[in-house]
Image: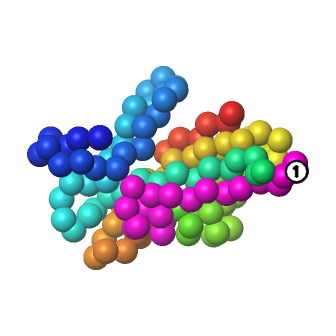
Amino acid sequence: MTKGDGKRALAIVNLKPEPKEFTSLVASATLPIQEDYAIVSLLPGLSPGRWIMLLAGTTTLGTQAAVEFACRPDTARQLIQRAGGVRLDRPMEAVIRTEVRGGVPVQNHLVAVHLH
């Protein structure tokens, strides 16, 4: 994706947005970064009955936030609830927005959850 200044930036693109959902998200353009985004995906693995969790941000700060979100009991519980409970029969993707202060992700927010 190209930002307004012509530079390329990583973005999270929503191919099937629900009403009032974003179509794309890009980390803050200012330095230091103040906001970033990440994806938490649960996908079928290569072997039957196995699953893969993918955690990726538009920057390393977003990736750090995704890992923290997936590993903390309170936010993991929030993700499970938004996904409709513990289910390992449907892939899902979630988008996390993180507020960054002093180069550290300090506050994470669940932006969207899609079941596939």
Furthest toward the top, the residue is 19
The x, y position of residue 64, in whole percent, is: 48, 69
Residue lying at the far right in this picture: please name it.
Answer: 49
Looking at this rendering, what residue extends furthest in the front direction? 46
Question: Residue at coordinates 83% horizontally, 41% vertically from top-left?
Answer: 89
Which residue is at 46% across, 34% downward? 14
Q: Which residue does the image show at 42% across and 37% down from the upper left?
A: 13
Q: Nearer the viewer, residue 65 or 54?
A: 54
Residue 9 visible in the displayed image:
yes
Q: Residue at horizontal 61%, vertical 44%?
A: 93
Q: Is residue 86 visible?
A: no
What segment is highlighted magenta in the picture?
47-65
Quadrant housing residue 106: bottom left
Neighbor class of circle 1 (other Cα within 10 Å; few <14, some 14-19, many 20+) is few
Residue 72 versus residue 4 in the image, above or below: below
Q: Is residue 51 left or right of residue 70?
A: right
Looking at the picture, does residue 1 appear above or below residue 69?
A: above
Instruction: Determine if the magenta segment contains residue 59.
Output: yes
Residue position marked by numbered label 1 in the rendering: 49
Q: Quadrant of the C terminus?
A: top right
Viewport quadrant of the N terminus: top left
Residue type marked 1: Gly
